[in-house]
Amino acid sequence: MKPQPATKISSFLAERIEAGDFPSAVYLIAERGEVIFADALGHSVIEPERRTATLETIYDLASLTKPLVTGLLVARLLESGTLRLDDEVANYLEPFRRSDKQAITVRHLATHTSGLPAWRPLYLLTGGDRSSALDAIAQLELESPPGTRVIYSDLGFIALGFLIERLTGRPFSEAAHDEIFAPLALKRTSFNPDESWRAEIAACELGGTIYEREMCRKLSAAEVRYDWREGVIWGEVHDENARFLGGASGHAGLFSCAHDAFCLAQQFLPRTTELLRPTTCALFSENMTAGLNEARALAWQLAATQDSTAGPSLPPESFGHTGFTGTSCWLDPHRERIFLLFTNRTHVPKLPFANINGVRRRFHSLAVAALGAKT
């Protein structure tokens, strides 16, 4: 059955486009391995030219890289026995052999409970030396003891990316291609997409990385000297740390379209996974941070987290993630439902970017209602 637009969802997203939240929106809603609803609205690019979004439009998925690639690669390493969740990271990464980092485990990194800060500009901390990135992370002061608090951390997943490279003996992008993209025959998914893809990619920030430049200025309380990008960011990763690390990192850098992302999401459900044993999928809905400030599973947030973007219509065992560029993916494992919403909210004429968490919650409520009406 060919997927059809869900009228109320498309109308709602069209309203948000008109309101200026984002220039484009692509959504896909699936149940039990079948895509039921899908649509594309608005413009994937508004400057320097206008391009209409389609279901084939490729988006910078930003932090969806964390579960869809890094989390999946970690799960495969766990299955093979190469890695264990409670292994100390210092066993694999020498820079973590420090008194304050020695107790950090793979589980801590994968659930954002390592105590590492949320973000730091590695391109500044290292003086532009990419080979010093892991050392720079290991030298940062922890904000809480490992295992005591959820602090959503790009740095923790960057470290996981380095760990994956260490264990596979391959660059992160090659490990992702060989272990995930190629076996699933994904044709529109990549790190560092080829220049020939550019016209099919949704554009990101106008005027270069103005947002991140301002973050650095606030962090240092002064103007920061760096080779900042100018003009529209289009066809290359938006996140500056990911760009500094070569465009492929454990925390960001993945580009994909809705259909390919749906194939990736299916790998986290027992009945549809092709890359994992079905029993391994329990790791993605298991609350590994019970009693802490967020409910977290392996690489995913659980809907049981207060004020999560799942909204009130998804059950608490649902798991999901968002991306800074305006993307999100949520899964209901019991009903085998997948909810993808891609926007390019960073491609707007001026800051600040819209906070679209309310849009995400409403989208999920409308999607659940649409699936209920279908049955």
Image (spheres, grey):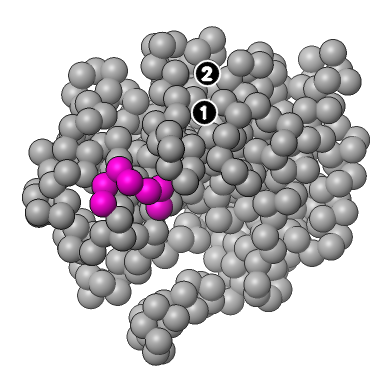
**What residue is shown with label 2?**
269
Nearer the observer, 302 or 240: 302
Counting residues from the N terminus, which is met first, the one under dot 2 or under dot 1?
1
Q: In the rendered image, is residue 147 in sight?
A: yes
Q: Residue at x 44, y 18 (%)?
A: 282
Which residue is at 34% across, 30% downward? 73
Amino acid of disc 2: Leu
Question: Is 214 displayed left or right of 105 in the figure?
Answer: right
Residue 91 in which image quadrant: top left
- Point out residue 284 in the picture as x, y percentages from the top left corner: 46, 26
**Residue 271 appears at what percent x and percent y?**
54, 10
Q: Which residue is mark 1?
A: 264
* Start-end of magenta stretch: 145-151
Image vertical order of residue 277 relative to residue 373, above or below: above
Q: Is residue 233 left or right of residue 27?
A: left
Kindly identify the residue that appears in the image at 79 percent across and 15 percent down.
Answer: 1
Marks 2,1: beta carbons within 8 A = no
| Element under disc 2 | loop
How many marks do you count on the picture? 2
